[in-house]
Image (cartoon, rainbow, N blue to C red):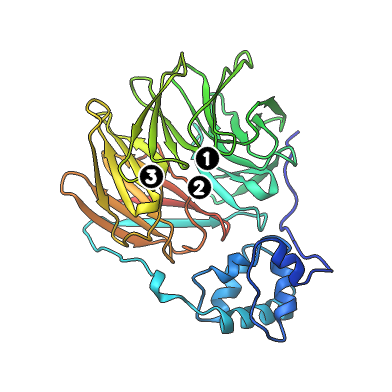
Amino acid sequence: MKKLLTIVSIVCVFPFSTSALAQSRGGQPLPDGPSKALVENTCSSCHSVASITRAAGYSTAQQWHDLFSTMIELPSAQANTIAAYLAEHFPEDTSRRPNLIAGDVEIDIIEWTAPTLGQRVRDPIEAPDGSIWWTGMWASLTGRLDPQTGVMEEYRLPPTSRPHTILPDADGNIWYTGNSNASIGKLDPISGEVTEYKTQARDPHSATFHPNGNLYFTAQGAAMLGRLNPDTGELKEIETQPRPYGIKAAQDGTLWIAYNGTNKIGAMHPDSMVVKYYEIPNERTRVRRLDLDSEGMVWFVNSTQGKIGRLDPATGAIKQWDSPSGPSSHPYALAVIDDVIWYNESGMRPDALVRFNPESESFQSWAIPSGVGIVRNVWKTEAGNLLIHQSSSNQIGLVKIN
């Protein structure tokens, strides 16, 4: 029997909060006003008020209402009061608008709202049957979307797992990294059964399957890399450079590691798990995601410098390009489709989707319709399209590239 979720929303309202709770969670004081306590009570029960004070803001109450309605279900009067307060004190910061570049390529972006509110959707993937899956990290669930009908189902995972990344296998199982309970998990969607493999690393992060059948993963906080044999359950874990993040397997079998704690990219041998490091210029460089083109070139986002880059593994040569919205654009997720680079500018509002053509060294970009939640990972579909998401606004997206 499937262990489907029947919850339709997460209502994170506590009856006792004040600014003390907000401050303890890392936020700055909210502006004074008759609705201040209500906003603190409601919003800081799920996240720090810093998520508000650092936000790019909205100019209208309706825009604020539309955003937090994807996070939490509130009575109408309470929602209207909160929206009015936020619009008054946190209007749009126009300096964070992206620099959108026109071009000849046409795309369509279709978005769906995940059923359980406030779950922080992320890391969508395509299963072999064409269905789209995602993780609901804050709700410890994973979900399935039929893109033809729009029907969505959600499956319970262990409540402490807080899954970060999911992967499909050839048999239709969904694997996930248990970021909060030190595990790699496997969900059988037919039975709802979950199998867990406990890791030494406290926070498995991103993962990829290798042609050898093993699952390789990063653990950002623990600064470790791991390998799981799904057939035997055998685990091997090693220490590595600080904050390993994205991971991809190349055609030659090399596993490429993006580092978010140092200015390096790693190349790991799948058998020995020995890592060779490539240093990216500027010690402030941090790399979150990477991918490979048909010639084995490694493309990466230089998040802290507002650039994308290319590493030639044969020579170690590195070339970088400035992203259209500049040094504060914070490129985040990246995929290579037909040797064209797709990524997002997560520091902008709305979040911008960017296309880079290496042949012409030209950019084109679009505003993501619900672009307030940050695309943290993307996935290339079998049809050559792109899966995206917006974590804060609870959206799963399909970018159809025409």
* Mark 3 lies on residue: 334
Question: How far is disc 1 from disc 3 in space, using C-alphas?
Answer: 21 Å
Q: In which quarter of the image is the N terminus?
A: top right
* Mark 2 lies on residue: 147
What is the secondary structure assignment of the residue under circle 2? loop
What is the secondary structure assignment of the residue under circle 1? loop
Q: Residue at x 77, y 65 (%)?
A: 13
**Label located before the other in sequence (3 or 2):** 2
Q: What residue type is labelled 3?
A: Leu
Camera-nearest label, 1 or 3? 3
- Horizontal and vertical percent for residue 248? 42, 31
Residue 94 vs residue 81, the one in the foreground: 94
Which mark, residue 131? 1
Q: Which amino acid does label 1 sit on?
A: Ser
- Horizontal and vertical percent for residue 319? 23, 42
Residue 371 vs residue 31, the one in the foreground: 31
Q: What residue type is labelled 2?
A: Pro
What is the secondary structure assignment of the residue under circle 3? strand
Which residue sits furthest right?
Answer: 16
Residue 160 in sight in this render: yes
- Do the residues under discs 2 and 1 have CB atoms within 8 angstroms? yes
